[in-house]
Image (cartoon, rainbow, N blue to C red):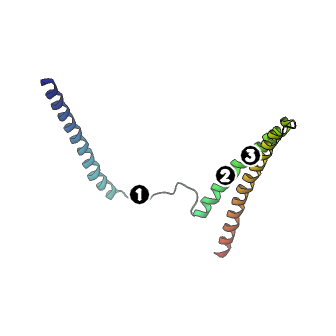
Amino acid sequence: MEHMRQCKKWYTHTCQRYMATAGFFVWYFVLFGIVGTAQAVEVLQNPLKFDRLDQLVAAVLQIVVMVSLPIISLIIVYSGFLFLTAQGNPKKLEGARDNIMYALIGAILVLGAWALAELLANTIEQLR
């Protein structure tokens, strides 16, 4: 029983010490952080090279197109390989046909999104 009381006393003392230390650092950063901020105010720099949202969206869409088109091309080549290895098996032919169809749908969606974004950007630019 005495051992339990000693453990509890040690635990309580350790927790109080850590809480006091944490409290000190919190107050230190609050007080000196505010004073430090008041002395030297820095203007946040824009880490991006884009000043407007439409420029950022156009750049993201361009990256998506640049990454997805080679992938779509590889999927189409793979689907052609599936056609060749199907050897008349209707189930394998259907799978290869589905692969090509989904790859073409993906290409249409990616290129359509890029074309629509370009069209909207050019229209907005002309209206300015």
- Under tag 1, what secondary structure? loop
Q: Which residue is mark 1?
A: 42
Q: Which residue is mark 3?
A: 70
Of the residues shown, which amino acid type is indicated by label 1? Answer: Glu
Please say if 59 is above or below 17: below
- Under tag 3, what secondary structure? helix
- At label 2, counting other C-alpha atoms closer than 10 Å, the crowd grade (few under 14, some 14-19, many 20 or more) is some
**Of callouts 3 and 2, the N-terminal one:** 2
Q: Position of residue 92 (x, y in %)?
A: 80, 39
Of the residues shown, which amino acid type is indicated by label 2? Answer: Val
Where, quadrant-wise, is the C terminus in this rendering?
bottom right
Mark 3 vs mark 1, CA separation in Å: 43 Å
Mark 3 vs mark 2, CA separation in Å: 11 Å
In the drawing, does residue 24 fall left or right of residue 76?
A: left
In the drawing, does residue 8 fall left or right of residue 118?
A: left
- At label 1, counting other C-alpha atoms closer than 10 Å, the crowd grade (few under 14, some 14-19, many 20 or more) is few
Q: Residue at x 41, y 57 (%)?
A: 42
**Of callouts 2 and 1, the N-terminal one:** 1
Please say if 19 is above or below 111: above
In the drawing, does residue 11 fall left or right of residue 105?
A: left
- Under tag 2, what secondary structure? helix
Answer with the quarter of the image where residue 49 lies.
bottom right
